[in-house]
Image: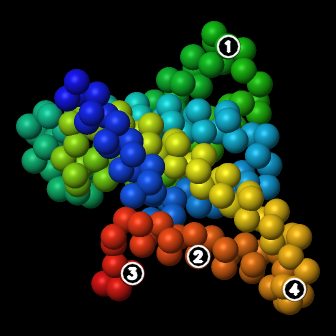
Amino acid sequence: MTIFLELISAAFYVMLFQNLIFNGGYGISEAVRMSAKPRQLVPMAIFITYFSTLVSVACVLLDRIPVINALNEIMHAIIFIAVVGVLYCVTVAAVLIYGKASPRTVRRIGVAAFNTLVFAVPLINYRSAFTVFEAIGSGVGAGVAFIIAVVLINSGLKRLDMNKSIPKCFKGTPAMFIYVALLSLAFIGISGNSVFI
């Protein structure tokens, strides 16, 4: 039961209180792009969850090796990037060999694998000294956080398009940036972090 609670608490922590997209800006460009085409949300969220979870677990397990554990944070980041690259190559090879995937699916896999959100999760796990089950929870939470971000941005864009009182110079991208900034401030307020350093 303790393992399950670790997994769930880490998932909720990353999903709500430490939403990496709104609090850290990781993966925000892909979330904004995806909000314009929400039909692609489910496959992209599945790929992001897959990569963030497996990379997190692999990095936590690698960090148990004393030689790797003794390395500094920059070397850990290089190892995390290498793990993402290896997992990407294995995934693409498996999908092409066994799944006969289309080029579009392979592109989606690449966008999901090399998303800043995927790179941020193992680094946060490393800094927080997460266990394997907490790493699984944070990977799943990052995928759900991506879904939350896309849904919130999409609903905001629809509301902004319907609002006729927005000045012409703020229509479109400027209004969207202001909306995302306000969402980010709300999530930072929920997390209890300070905006000031």
Q: CA distance from mark 2 to mark 3?
A: 12 Å
Q: Which residue is mark 3?
A: 195
The correct choice, above or below, for 98 with respect to 149 in the image is above
Q: Residue at x 72, y 21 (%)?
A: 101
**Which sits earlier in the primary sequence, circle 2 or circle 3?**
2
Where residue 149 appears, x then y in whole percent? 60, 55
Report crowding for label 1: few under 14, some 14 to 19, many 20 or more residues within 10 A (C-alpha). Answer: few
Of marks 1 and 4, the one in the foreground:
4
Q: Is residue 38 above or below residue 152?
A: above
Residue flagged by tag 4: what amino acid is it? Ser
Disc marking residue 165: 4
Which residue in the structure is indicated by mark 2? 182
Mark 2 and 4 residues: CB-CB less than 8 Å, in contact? no
Secondary structure at badge 2 equals helix
Which color mode does the image show?
A: rainbow
Q: CA distance from mark 2 to mark 4?
A: 18 Å
Q: Residue at x 38, y 42 (%)?
A: 11
The answer to whether the residues at label 1 and label 4 have Cβ atoms under 8 Å apart is no
On the rendered image, what quadrant is the N terminus found in?
top left
Q: Earlier in the sequence, mark 1 or mark 4?
A: 1
Depth-wise, is mark 1 or mark 3 nearer the camera? 3
Label 3, secondary structure: give it: loop
Q: Nearer the viewer, residue 161 or 172?
A: 161
Residue under the point 76% across and 46% down: 38
Q: Which residue is mark 1?
A: 99
